[in-house]
Image (spheres, rainbow, N blue to C red):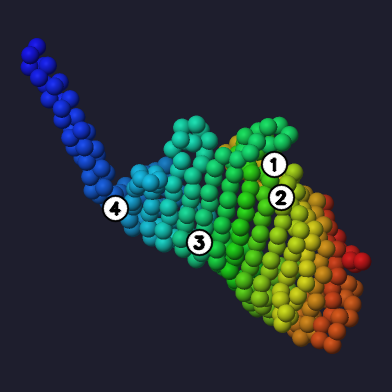
């Protein structure tokens, strides 16, 4: 009994030293663990989990506990069946542990060099919806200088396009989608290029010589299942095309079990473009369908004013003169 009392007395006297030793062992073990050797392990596990449909490889891995919990990987390479390979110089994921415990996703995601640009996403608890008082998450998205060529390959778009995409968005989202998201979106494309190519149309592909735009800017809002463009500016002074776009389209995000998909419906857009005669001359075949909407606009350009509408995105649009 005397020895037990002496042991507890010893532990009480040296408790700070013992706590420091245990903490030091934990910290040094955490820091010195060979995380970089886990690349092959994760590659094998991801392949097994996805039935060999996804291949993941990275160069180095770092974990941190302070000041924030997170994981960072460098030189990431991902290949998925049916999609082009994706690469990123660095990906940093910082989840909120307290939010995960409460089953409310929160944290941040940063990808450097993804699609040749930078993408940053932040998620945190947001305000409840006004109508049903449903809890929502506040999502902030920042996209900088993402390549349109990379996006075209990723989504399989039919037209060859070039340029840099910048996007900023703030949204309130219920991840069960019992209510539609609310979002403010600002999009800007710099140095847009449509190179010589064939554009698919209802009557077959039409060859175009291509054109350039200094910028394309859109500011819009997604609310109650509809996306409205409050301000759309196409081109700038000196471009062969310059004008404005306004209007909206029905856009609902639907939760279909394991997948989330957009559903588009009725749309209407008012388009007013000043097109230089040099471009009209080069693209006679493409612009011949718009001749009825043309009015003289000056010595070197004409104005095309068009209202484009439709009940869905499956059939051809209805076009009329914009008054």
Residue 234 lies left or right of residue 46; in this view the side is right
Residue 97 at what x, y percent from top left?
44, 38
Look at mark 1 in the image and give the residue it sits on.
180
Q: Nearer the viewer, residue 71 or 312?
A: 71
Label 1 – label 2 distance at C-alpha:
9 Å
Dot placed on the residue nearer the N-terminal end, 4 or 3: 4
Look at mark 3 in the image and give the residue it sits on.
118
Label 4 – label 1 distance at C-alpha:
42 Å
Label total for image = 4
Which numbered marker is on residue 131? Answer: none
Look at mark 2 in the image and give the residue it sits on.
222
| Residue occupying the point 80% across, 76% down | 274
| Residue occupying the point 47% across, 57% down | 111
Residue 5 lies left or right of residue 118; in this view the side is left
Q: Tag 2's secondary structure?
A: strand
Marks 1/2 in contact by CB < 8 Å: the verdict is yes
């Amino acid at each position: 009994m005397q020895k037990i009392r002496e042991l507890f007395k010893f532990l009480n006297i040296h408790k700070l030293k013992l706590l420091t030793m245990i903490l030091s062992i934990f910290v040094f073990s955490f820091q010195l663990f060979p995380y970089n050797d886990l690349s092959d392990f994760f590659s094998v596990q991801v392949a097994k989990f996805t039935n060999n449909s996804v291949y993941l490889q990275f160069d180095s891995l770092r974990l941190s506990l302070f000041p924030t919990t997170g994981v960072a990987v460098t030189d990431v390479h991902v290949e998925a069946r049916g999609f082009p390979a994706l690469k990123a110089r660095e990906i940093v994921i910082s989840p909120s542990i307290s939010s995960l415990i409460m089953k409310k996703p929160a944290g941040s995601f940063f990808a450097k060099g993804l699609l040749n640009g930078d993408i940053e996403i932040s998620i945190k608890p947001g305000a409840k919806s006004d109508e049903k008082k449903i809890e929502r998450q506040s999502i902030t998205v920042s996209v900088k200088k993402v390549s349109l060529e990379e996006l075209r390959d990723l989504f399989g778009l039919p037209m060859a396009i070039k340029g840099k995409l910048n996007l900023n968005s703030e949204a309130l989202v219920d991840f069960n989608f019992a209510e539609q998201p609310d979002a403010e979106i600002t999009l800007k494309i710099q140095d847009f290029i449509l190179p010589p190519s064939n554009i698919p149309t209802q009557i077959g592909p039409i060859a175009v010589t291509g054109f350039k735009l200094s910028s394309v800017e859109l500011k819009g809002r997604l609310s109650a299942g509809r996306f409205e463009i409050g301000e759309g500016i196409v081109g700038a002074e000196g471009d062969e095309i310059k004008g404005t776009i306004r209007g909206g389209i029905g856009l609902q995000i639907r939760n279909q079990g394991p997948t989330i998909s957009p559903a588009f419906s009725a749309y209407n857009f008012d388009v007013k473009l000043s097109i230089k005669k040099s471009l009209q001359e080069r693209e006679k075949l493409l612009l011949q369908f718009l001749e009825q909407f043309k009015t003289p606009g000056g010595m070197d350009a004409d104005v095309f004013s068009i209202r484009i509408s439709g009940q869905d995105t499956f059939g051809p649009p209805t076009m009329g003169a914009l008054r």
